[in-house]
């Protein structure tokens, strides 16, 4: 049996964390003995790990400046301190400290795989390392580097100069489970049952998700007489700032935060459109899930979106990655609601390619081929 360790920062309510749980929960336990280890013992998804999976952690809680502090410590020392058992394959499932630590494995026979989930900047690429050169040398030690979309792959190659053994594998979504959960009844009274157009977003409420600019676009469209509701599922540091803006402009009843919900799919399925307002993505889990439940997607141009929706908007609407782009795209939909019906059919068609078995089998095949 092949022993695999998946190493990730935590199992909080983010996309990478969620798709890792989806992946390991659906792997073949007759072939793989799986351990998930987190740097920090935090996250709503810990309890969602299958009982067949071993769980370990390094620290009880995250501490301020942890990436920079860990970067100052020798990677080999960190590896020996935390990675105690023997494994056939070590997987760093997130950029940063986890990748730096796994790269320091001293055993030649152990295969190493690094996942890259998002397009990175020069500064972001090396944020958990002493230097960009250390980051590049760390990645060179991996036998495979998995990117979640073609654009993420190209971005990684440009930043690192590494193009050997860099491949694209799509994230795993539990498609049948998502469809089943999407049929659950909604009891939250904040989600209105009127006939106004309902738009929704699902993500951590962080600056890079673009919810502030979405609120500004919403304000502009409301002032122009386009009635609609926007619902945001998620929690995060920028929520108070956005709510202050909504309060100042009298928008509390039309732009509504629903908080974190373990089942966002029931809201997404009952929304007329899913909106991704992000400045950057890797291969958006939430947008993929919207397609699975048949909800049309309107998104800013981020990594992976053209692969997901087509370069010519075949399966969804991609707009310029700016406040103006969001404004024009949403205004066009509000002026032409027939587009929602058209893209609903396209969403249902496209959602079929993200089956759980296809994505899991592709990852398992990659692991097995590494050991041959």
Image (spheres, grey):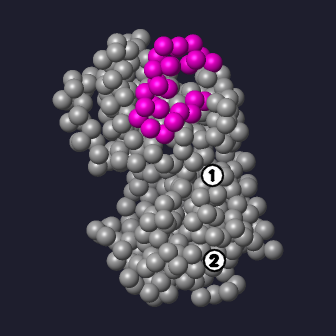
Magenta region: 316-342
State the CA–CA distance, disc 1 to disc 2: 20 Å
Q: Name the side, left or right, on which 102 lies relative to 11.
A: right
Q: From the image, tell me which residue sits under label 2.
A: 140
Q: Element at badge 2?
A: loop
The image shows residue 335 at horizontal and vertical percentages of 48, 13
How packed mark 1 is, by other alpha carbons closer than 10 Å (few <14, some 14-19, many 20 or more), is many
Residue denoted by label 1: 151
Give the residue furthest to the front: 324
Q: Is residue 290 visible?
A: no
Would residue 348 appear left or right of 216 to someone viewing this image? Answer: right
Q: Is residue 288 above or below residue 221?
A: below
The residue drawn where x is 35% and y is 48% is: 206
Q: Nearer the viewer, residue 53 or 167?
A: 167
Residue at (68%, 56%) from the top-left corner? 168
In percent of width and height, residue 73 lies at 40, 84
**Residue 338 magenta:** yes
Q: Quadrant of the N terminus?
A: bottom right
Secondary-structure class at tag 1 = helix
Q: Is residue 342 above or below residue 134?
A: above
The mark total stands at 2
Residue at image point 69% right, 65% down: 166
User: Which quadrant holds the C terminus?
Assistant: bottom right
- Residue 258: within the magenta? no
x, y percent for residue 140: 63, 77
Q: Residue furthest right?
A: 372
In terms of depth relative to the viewer, which is nearer, 164 or 5? 164
Q: Which residue is more in the foreground, 139 or 32? A: 139
Q: Quadrant of residue 284?
A: top right
């Amino acid at each position: 049996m092949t022993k695999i360790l998946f190493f990730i920062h935590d199992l909080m309510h983010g996309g990478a964390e969620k798709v890792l749980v989806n992946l390991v929960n659906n792997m073949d336990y007759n072939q793989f003995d799986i351990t998930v280890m987190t740097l920090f013992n935090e996250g709503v998804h810990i309890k969602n790990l299958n009982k067949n999976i071993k769980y370990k952690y390094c620290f009880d809680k995250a501490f301020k400046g942890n990436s920079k502090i860990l970067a100052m410590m020798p990677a080999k020392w960190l590896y020996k301190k935390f990675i105690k058992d023997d494994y056939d394959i070590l997987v760093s499932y997130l950029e940063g400290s986890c990748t730096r630590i796994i790269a320091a494995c001293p055993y030649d026979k152990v295969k190493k795989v690094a996942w890259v989930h998002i397009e990175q900047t020069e500064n972001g690429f090396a944020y958990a390392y002493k230097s960009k050169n250390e980051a590049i040398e760390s990645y060179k030690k991996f036998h495979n580097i998995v990117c979640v979309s073609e654009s993420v792959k190209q971005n990684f190659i440009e930043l690192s100069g590494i193009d050997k053994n860099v491949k694209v594998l799509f994230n795993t979504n539990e498609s049948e489970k998502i469809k089943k959960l999407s049929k659950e009844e909604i009891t939250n009274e904040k989600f209105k049952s009127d006939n106004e157009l309902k738009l929704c977003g699902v993500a951590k409420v962080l600056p890079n998700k673009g919810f502030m600019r979405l609120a500004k676009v919403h304000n502009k469209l409301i002032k122009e007489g386009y009635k609609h509701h926007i619902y945001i599922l998620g929690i995060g540091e920028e929520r108070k700032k956005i709510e202050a803006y909504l309060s100042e402009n009298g928008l509390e009843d039309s732009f509504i935060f629903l908080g974190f919900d373990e089942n966002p799919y029931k809201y997404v399925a009952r929304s007329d459109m899913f909106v991704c307002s992000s400045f950057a993505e890797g291969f958006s889990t939430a947008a993929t899930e919207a397609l699975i439940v048949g909800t049309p997607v309107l998104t800013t141009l981020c990594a992976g979106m053209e692969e997901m929706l087509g370069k010519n908007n075949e399966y969804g609407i991609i707009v310029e990655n700016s406040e103006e782009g969001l404004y024009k795209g949403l205004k066009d939909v509000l002026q032409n609601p027939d587009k929602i019906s058209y893209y609903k059919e396209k969403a249902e068609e496209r959602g079929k390619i993200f089956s759980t078995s296809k994505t899991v089998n592709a990852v398992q095949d990659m692991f097995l081929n590494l050991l041959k």
